[in-house]
Amino acid sequence: MKKFNFFMLASLLMAFVAVSGNAFAENKVSAQKDLNYHRAKWDPIHFKPAIDSATNEQCLACHKEIIEKKPLDASPAGVKKSDVLAWYQTLSTYEGEQDTFHRRHLVGNYSTKLMNLKCNTCHQGNDPREETAGSSADGPISEVQRKMVNPNTCLMCHGQFPWKHMAGLTGPWSESGKIFGNNCVACHVAFRTNRHKVNFLNAAAIEKEGATNGDVCFGCHGGRSWYRISYPYPRHAWPGMATNIPDWAKDRPTTSQARFLTGVKDIATSKTNTK
Ligand code: HEC
Ligand code: HEC
Ligand code: HEC
Ligand code: HEC
Ligand code: HEC
């Protein structure tokens, strides 16, 4: 690819030289600029396998606008941003002023305390040919039509509260939570204790914050649900776990997705579910 571009540039420049020798310098600059944009757009970092090891700094070298840009204080028509809050932006867990999607997940105080999201936690490739699933030989087939990010990634933290899988709960958290003092850890000190050992979560910080405030746990397990379904969480073995597997859990993986384990020090070994 690089070689191909180089030869294209070379022959383009030679053509310019041949046609108008004196305009060489000027044309070289614009040709170079043009080529740089396309080179950047087709940079191998947007594709597998390079994207898997890309750091935020590498992506931000070209895309710093996604961190720097903030919502306008007022729309061009004069509507203030404080007057157009969405319902969830009025809740106590929503800190500070309205902010952009990327800033909320990557630089917000609350997010950086609990999470360690990377560009490639969500972005698994960005082929400019490919905003339609499976339409080229090397295109991702897991992506949903015209989406740059697989929505299953969002579902992990924005699904419904799966109370039907929780023995002891008789209804949604808004009803059953009161009995437990809005405290998830009341039960989760004993159930599914082997959790959050993935590279995009700060497991220890989550336990610390969640111990006294159930809204922290609920926030990622139903409180910010943009979906009508819940995520099929992997079911890691935990100390004291019963040997029989409930029906709903029979098809569950027993480890987190492999790409979320790179760089995680404390990966508990867990055995595979036997059906
Ligand atoms: C060398 C510069 C460069 C680097 C490094 C780079 N990009 Fe890009 N990226 C571009 C350019 C240029 C485009 C095309 C933008 C356009 O056409 O509006 C683009 C497009 C994109 C798009 C699609 C934007 C759209 O509006 O369609 C996404 C998403 C994206 N890049 C994510 C990333 C991620 C994630 C990384 C790091 C893994 C990354 N980029 C690294 C230059 C870069
Ligand atoms: C929480 C998941 C998530 C993370 C983390 C994330 N992005 Fe995105 N990004 C998205 C989504 C979703 C879109 C919109 C995709 C679409 O329109 O299909 C998007 C869009 C973009 C675009 C297109 C322009 C725009 O603003 O819509 C660029 C460029 C981009 N992301 C770069 C980055 C870079 C660089 C990082 C890391 C510093 C990053 N993203 C981290 C989910 C994420
Ligand atoms: C690892 C967990 C996690 C993942 C994955 C995740 N989010 Fe979030 N999201 C959060 C948390 C936590 C907040 C609350 C941040 C805050 O209030 O400061 C949030 C906030 C939001 C908001 C509100 C932003 C605002 O400022 O109004 C939207 C919208 C959102 N997420 C959409 C998405 C989408 C779409 C994806 C997938 C591309 C995604 N999230 C992936 C945890 C996650
Ligand atoms: C009455 C006890 C109890 C309370 C309170 C409770 N849970 Fe659970 N939870 C369970 C049990 C039991 C399971 C299933 C254990 C198993 O896998 O066999 C479970 C499973 C889960 C799962 C995995 C579900 C799946 O489909 O794999 C999540 C996530 C979870 N709980 C989060 C929470 C959060 C967040 C709260 C607080 C908002 C909470 N739980 C409150 C008992 C409880
Ligand atoms: C920032 C978002 C976030 C917060 C806050 C959070 N979780 Fe989770 N939780 C997740 C994600 C993402 C997973 C799936 C991780 C994976 O793939 O292994 C998960 C998995 C789980 C599981 C399944 C464990 C397993 O692997 O068997 C349980 C149970 C659970 N969480 C309970 C809780 C409890 C209790 C709290 C509060 C102390 C809490 N969560 C706070 C995002 C969050």
Image (cartoon, rainbow, N blue to C red):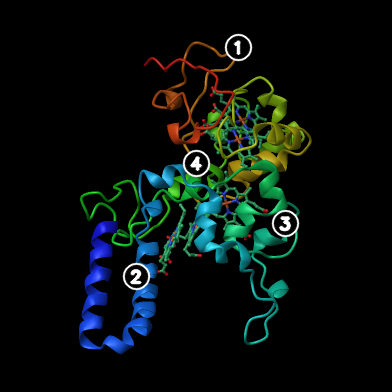
* Cα distance between the residues tagged 1 and 4: 25 Å
Three-letter amino acid code of the residue under disc 1: Gly
- Mark with earlier residue (2, 3): 2
Between residue 238 and residue 90, name the one nearer to us.
Answer: 238
* Cα distance between the residues tagged 4 and 2: 45 Å
Instruction: Tell me: is circle 4 under 8 Å from ligand 4.
Output: yes
Q: Secondary structure at mark 2?
A: helix
The residue pinned by badge 1 equals 240
The residue pinned by badge 2 equals 35
Q: Is residue 169 left or right of residue 53?
A: right
| Residue pictured at 62% horizontal, 59% vertical | 103
The residue pinned by badge 4 equals 230
- Mark with earlier residue (3, 1): 3
Is residue 250 visible in the rendered image? The answer is yes
Query: Which image quarter holds the N terminus?
Result: bottom left
| Residue pictured at 41% horizontal, 23% vertical | 250
Instruction: Tell me: is circle 3 under 8 Å from ligand 3.
Output: no
| Residue pictured at 35% horizontal, 53% vertical | 144
